[in-house]
Amino acid sequence: MPARRPSLDDLRRDIDEIDDAIHDLLMKRAEIGRRVREAKGAGGPIFRPGREARILRRLLERHDGPFPARVVMRIWREIVSAFAVMQGPFSVAVYSPEEGVDLAGLAREHFGSASPLRGFAADSSVLRAVSEGEATLGVLPLPARGESDCWWRSLARDDKARPRIVARLPFVGPARDGGGPEALVVGLMAPEPSGDDLGYLIVETREPLSRGRLRELLESAGFEILDSSVSSESEATRLHLIEVAGYLSEDDPRLSRVTGPGQGGRQDDAQEGPIARIWTAGGYARPLAATRFADDEAKAEDSP
């Protein structure tokens, strides 16, 4: 005798049971999150971009079936961000000028509906909010060539309140039509490796250097230079923002190969050479490429 075909009511009961199981697991995850907070104690980092990147990459690799992978990423971003808020005081300062690209939507998509966001009309105000502890993180526009007033110049200093680049948005690649704003996230915590990372150096030169010559100097020290570099020159300093492949730590041994002896690879003014000083400005986990979600978008287009 053939098995009875499940009725619509049977299928709805199955869905209700699955919903209850998902809800139970979320509550269990929250309890474990509370225990993690107790284990870390006061002062532990709330935002862990390297760990978050590893979580999303792992889920994407194991994902299967018709449910859109991009939506899975969005759900887990909400979950991870909600638990970050539960860990302690957490807020995000966002560059939101009266004219130009407003990054609030990009920040909300990444940090979720539970995270407090506050807009600032000036990038300097975002950096100040992070430096003074008024905000946990700051969201700032991706640097571009030709800018005369560059927010990243403020990262070229040595004090403890110096923000560092810790993430890039969007982490989940844009839809296939592309476009949309991009941003960097800064915070006071040190970036942590995710297994697939890019980093930023800020280099101060004693004299004007071509991009080719600067690249040659850095590559001779062992850095793999990417195609993006931004320069900013004032009456006092000549600074270059250089993106490099791989994770950068504050004590990366390649720094001293660029400038010679000195703590953190920083060169004494008495020493001569084209590069005066160098700072690690942070880095970020490489975002998930939009091509990873192409199948989802193709299915959506084929749907009636």
Image: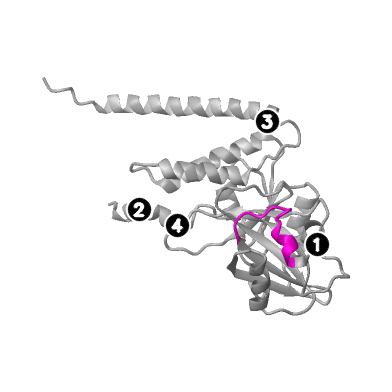
Q: Is residue 240 above or below residue 108?
A: below
Indicate which disc residue 290 carries. 4
Query: Dot 2: what SS?
Result: helix
**Mark with earlier residue (2, 3):** 3
- Identify the image quadrant of residue 211: bottom right
Query: Dot 1: what SS?
Result: loop
Mark 4 vs 2: CB contact within 8 A: no
Query: Dot 4: what SS?
Result: helix
Q: CA distance from mark 4 to mark 2?
A: 10 Å
Q: Residue at x 61, y 30 (%)?
A: 33
Any part of residue 74 in sight: no
Mark 1 Cα shell of 10 Å, populated few (<14), some (14-19), many (≥20): some
Q: Which residue is mark 1?
A: 261
Q: Which residue is mark 2?
A: 295
The answer to if 263 sits in the magenta stretch is: no
User: What amino acid type is highlighted by mark number 1?
Assistant: Pro
Indicate which disc residue 37 carries. 3
**Mark with earlier residue (1, 3):** 3
Q: Going by the picture, which residue comes out furthest to the right?
A: 270
Mark 4 Cα shell of 10 Å, populated few (<14), some (14-19), many (≥20): some
Query: Dot 3: what SS?
Result: helix
Chosen colour scheme: one colour
Q: Residue at x 49, y 64 (%)?
A: 179
The residue stretch that appears in magenta: 245-258
Q: CA distance from mark 2 to mark 3?
A: 38 Å
